[in-house]
Image (cartoon, helix red, strand yellow):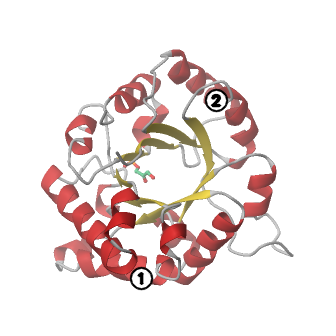
Amino acid sequence: MRKQIAAANWKMNSTYQQGEKLMDEILGARIKLTPDQLTIFAVPFPYLLMGRSEVAEEKNYHVAAQNCHHKKSGAFTGEVSAEMLHSIGVAYCVVGHSERREYFGETNAQVAEKIDQCLQNFITPLFCCGEALDVREAGEQNNHVALQLRESLFHLTAEQMKGVIIAYEPIWAIGTGKTATTAQAQEMHAHLRSILSEQFGQSTADQVSILYGGSVKANNARELFGCPDVDGGLVGGASLVGAEFVQIIGALKK
Ligand code: 13P
């Protein structure tokens, strides 16, 4: 079975102390993950080492950075490279989140470079894609995500592609309380997998985990994760509430 993944994206929320307490609460619930399940906490940069020590004794629990720079190193004040993340033992990194694309002008080409930086530094990228509301209303969502995949992932080999996690996050569902229906999620995830299959072959496509993100909550996670091509979720708001996120982890396919 493909890896089933519950990924928390804290975004720019919580103090260090609140974050530590939240992780204590979630890990304290002692949800045992199967070998095919993972939980990943994408925390702000200053909390990565704390998070890493929190999960150190936990099987299949990891931390992720929420971003990295697209260049290897250099005069980029305030930025963090994939190499730096690797040097403190971070093994996952979110790249191309829609908020980075919208507010920081990230392009598909830069996201492609970030993917390369991650892979060169033994970091598994969680590559985000997804369409805005106007794109969906125009019925262009399939073409939109196809372009995102083409421009950011198609330069990879099949072997490299197996080391990437995809998160489909329709922008209209992020932080809005509006979730894609299971039919919409399954349809898009199947579409993404068919794009991967065409480019990298079926066996690679079958191994890539595709997460759904956009108002995943404790009360809709099981239904969404139950879709055959939905391999878990990338969760914002609900990942900041311990009891909610515990239930979301518990909703992963077994
Ligand atoms: P919400 O779960 O708050 O809608 O956020 C989704 C998201 O952007 C996760 O990366």
Tell which circle, 2 or 1, labels the residue nearer the N-terminal end: 2
Amino acid, disc 1 = Arg
Residue 184's spot in the image, x, y percent?
17, 59
Identify the amino acid type marked 2: Val
Residue 164 rendering spot, x and y as whole percentages: 50, 61
| Tag of residue 203 | none
Marking on residue 150: 1
Foreground pick, 185 / 178: 185
- Residue 193, located in which quarter of the rendered image? bottom left
> Which labelled disc corresponds to residue 55?
2
Q: Nearer the viewer, residue 139 or 192?
A: 192
Q: Residues within 10 Å of mark 1 (few under 14, many from 20)?
A: some
Q: Position of residue 248 (x, y in %)?
A: 36, 32
Q: Secondary structure at mark 2?
A: helix
In three-dimensional space, the C-alpha distance between marks 2 and 1, rounded to whole angstroms, equals 35 Å
For the residue with label 2, is its CB less than 8 Å from the closest atom of ligand 1? no
124 relative to 119, above or below = above
Location of the C terminus by quadrant is top left
Residue 63, image quadrant:
top right
Q: Is residue 64 visible?
A: yes
Residue 80 appears in the rendering:
no
